[in-house]
Amino acid sequence: MAEKVLMKGNEAIAEAAIIAGCRHYFGYPITPQTEIAAYMAKRMPKIGGTFLQAESEIAAINMVYGVSSTGKRVMTSSSSPGISLKSEGISYLAGCDLPALVVNCQRGGPGLGGIQPSQSDYFQATRGGGHGDYHMIVLAPASVQEMAELTIRGFELADEYRMTAMILADGTIGQMMEPVSFDFAIKEAPEKPWAVTGTKMERAHNIINSLYLVPDVLEQKNFERYEKYAKVAENVALAEEYLMDDAEIVIAAFGIAARVAKNAVNAARAEGIKAGLIRPITLWPFPEKAFKKALGTAKQFISVELSMGQMIEDVRLATECKVPVSLCNRAGGMIPSPEQVYEAIKAAAGKAGK
Amino acid sequence: MNYKRITLLCGHYGSGKTNVAVNMALDVRRTHDNVVVADLDIVNPYFRTLDSRDEFTHAGIKLIVSSYANSNLDMPALPQEMYSLVDDRRLTCIVDVGGDDRGAVALGRISGAIREENNYDMFLVINRFRPLTPDAPSVLEIMHEIEAAASLKFTGIINNSNLGAETEPETVLSSLDYAREVSRLTGLPIVLTSAEKSIAEALSGKVDNLFPLHLQKRPVD
């Protein structure tokens, strides 16, 4: 597909997954991510893949566990309440060091909440969600093009580090339509000598298991996993920096919030306010270096979020609270307007000027 | 364009039915009283005609939409007022039908009365740059599915080929052969080629039956 096509964010994820070699999709419908399943249902049978609508989200994530054990690229997708259901399975994936791609096209919560876009699963995505000491690699696309690119990156990172990669999108990016190019190089999936593919009586058999009843063995497993996480933190963290060379008022925003914030930063610049934007593309690992660097000029950070304020904690940790960090937000499915963010920048600039 | 009493807009989801419906309603209103826009989209609760409510109110156009649209309820409910489309023949109606065959099922509820009155057009909205309808045979497949679900036959094609904000006049020009091939395969005429206003102006004289669209600006653009 050299020519651009016009796609919904959800469709771009599905097509990119197919390009990445994913031939197994298991899911259960939920607004606002159902187009992923609908697209897979149409495409997978035509390319010899498997689309299966499971009886529940819990069943779907356990099917992911099964296919991942065989070394194949596999994914599932859902929206917030469905991800809560999948969280047990995600913890099991982590406990077995199995790679997988999980998409969360977030909606407002808690509980059943609503169907409009939200970013209130940030804690769940970056802090676990399921039980035990583990992390996922969390990628936050801000355009339909990035939905495609980060899906492919997600599969690559998942295989490289034997982790679950999560695409943390939201209802807006999932639903909005933008032109997409699929003209990018795909890395071959690495060898997976750990996979259960049949020994052919030529090797010892592989075991996929997360049960370790001997505590010092389990402790050692956790130590090793965290050494791996340290490498991921060093190698994978990524952010886009926009007008950050001299930024005094620094917006931190990811995904759709960053799109809105960029308009506000431009408006502030037009008024002579030195505003800039750091857009974390990986939420875990959090791109701390970009924030530490910003401390050279920053007088205040503003975290713009579609939640009651979750990423703001990582902004404070990364900046060690050396300058004030405030919140500009909407919740429950509402999106901040560029004007609301601009007013927050103006107020911060006024305070910083005194 | 000469509008029939009822104009039905159907097509693959994401083909641009809602944008065409909104602009068509405003166009009909210039020559007709008692204009009604009905949103029968039970598939997608995002981005709907309801987003244009203020514009419709200002233009004196009545909007019929599910009371759950744009709410936080994911309810595939049809508005009960949809029966007025066929019961009240003083109305001139533009009907935005949901995507694919699943969306067109809703239309099946009133298709008997529409056929009986026989004063309607049903247009197939197509976009060459949608990934699942890149060629005429794939359009034909979806067209047959929609006709089966709606129990109505199409009467024409609207070529709405576009690449969103990246649409150029060449984008539309490169879709003309595609639209002609769909027309040849289906035997349906291309009644309109729709494009954003500035693009349509640039195409003036090069494309027949141009229909300029005024598009809403989004806060994330």
Image (spheres, rainbow, N blue to C red):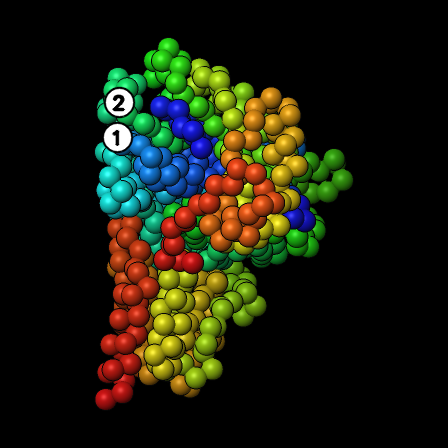
Q: Position of residue A19 (x, y in %)?
A: 63, 45
Disc 2 residue type?
Answer: Arg
Residue at 40% across, 58% down? B220
Q: Is residue B168 above or below residue A8?
A: below
- The quadrant holding residue A251 is bottom left
Q: Nearer the viewer, residue A123 or A352?
A: A352
Q: Is residue A300 above or below residue A234?
A: below
Identify the residue under disc 1. B34
| Count of residue discs | 2
Q: Is residue B212 above or below residue A201?
A: below
Query: Residue at the right extreme?
Result: A202
Q: Nearer the viewer, residue B210 or A159?
A: B210
Q: Does residue A44 show up? A: no
**Badge 2: residue crowd in 10 Å (few <14, some 14–19, many ≥20):** few
Residue at 26% across, 22% down? B90
Q: Position of residue A82 (x, y in %)?
A: 37, 40
Q: Position of residue A308 (x, y in %)?
A: 26, 59
Q: Position of residue B101 (x, y in %)?
A: 46, 24
Residue at 54% across, 70% down? A234
- Mark 2 lies on a secondary structure that is loop
**Badge 1: residue crowd in 10 Å (few <14, some 14–19, many ≥20):** some
In which chain is the residue bearing label 1?
A: B
| Left or right relative to A172: residue A44 | right
- Could you tell me how far apart the alpha carbons at marks 2 and 1 are, in whole angstroms? 7 Å
Identify the residue under disc 2. B90
